Amino acid sequence: MGIFSKVFNSSDLVSGMARRLGADIASDLLENPDMNATNMRSLVIRCAACRDQEGCAALQQGRAHLDHAPDYCMNKDYLEHLARG
């Protein structure tokens, strides 16, 4: 997989995980666009470095809600914190 494909796929996985956890990334971005654009980039880069993107995609497939991100998710703490509000 090329680097751009990996980044686009990672962006989709981050968005999907956030949606399933109930984490509102869009609102977080709007509160402080400069700071949070950097956070979003970091989320995607961490996801791109994950060794189990296939497992993450399989976990998300067919599930509209997740109570927790998987333990291997490098964005687990941030996404769960955002989901708790």
Image (spheres, rainbow, N blue to C red):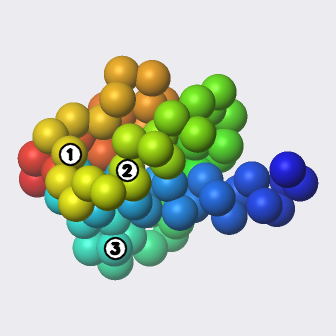
> Which residue is found at the position 18% from the left and 54% from the top?
65
For residue 16, side relative to residue 9 (left or right): left
- Label 3 to label 2: alpha-carbon separation: 19 Å
The answer to whether 45 is drawn above or below residue 37 in the figure is above
Q: Amino acid at mark 2?
A: Gln
For residue 33, side relative to residue 6 (left or right): left
Q: In the structure shown, which secondary structural element does the residue marked by tag 1 occupy? A: loop
Quarter occupied by residue 38: bottom right
> Which residue is found at the position 85% from the left and 50% from the top?
1
Residue denoted by label 2: 60
Work out whether residue 65 or residue 71 is closer to the camera in this orientation and state it. Answer: 65
Q: In the structure shown, which secondary structural element does the residue marked by tag 2 occupy? A: helix
Residue denoted by label 3: 26
Q: In the structure shown, which secondary structural element does the residue marked by tag 3 occupy? A: helix
Q: Residues within 10 Å of mark 1 (few under 14, many from 20)?
A: some
Give whichever of discs 3 and 2 has the lower sequence position: 3
Q: Position of residue 32 (x, y in %)?
A: 37, 70
Q: Amino acid at mark 3?
A: Ala
Work out whether residue 1 or residue 85 is closer to the camera in this orientation and state it. Answer: 1
The reply to whether residue 38 is in sight is no
The answer to whether 18 is drawn above or below residue 28 in the figure is above
Do the residues bearing badges 1 and 2 touch, measured as CB atoms within 8 Å? Answer: yes
Residue denoted by label 1: 66
Observer-side mark, 3 or 1, equals: 1
Work out whether residue 65 or residue 42 is closer to the camera in this orientation and state it. Answer: 65
- Label 1 to label 2: alpha-carbon separation: 8 Å
Q: Residue furthest bottom?
A: 30
Q: Residues within 10 Å of mark 3 (few under 14, many from 20)?
A: few
Q: Position of residue 52 (x, y in %)?
A: 58, 30
For residue 3, side relative to residue 57 (left or right): right
Q: Amino acid at mark 1?
A: Leu
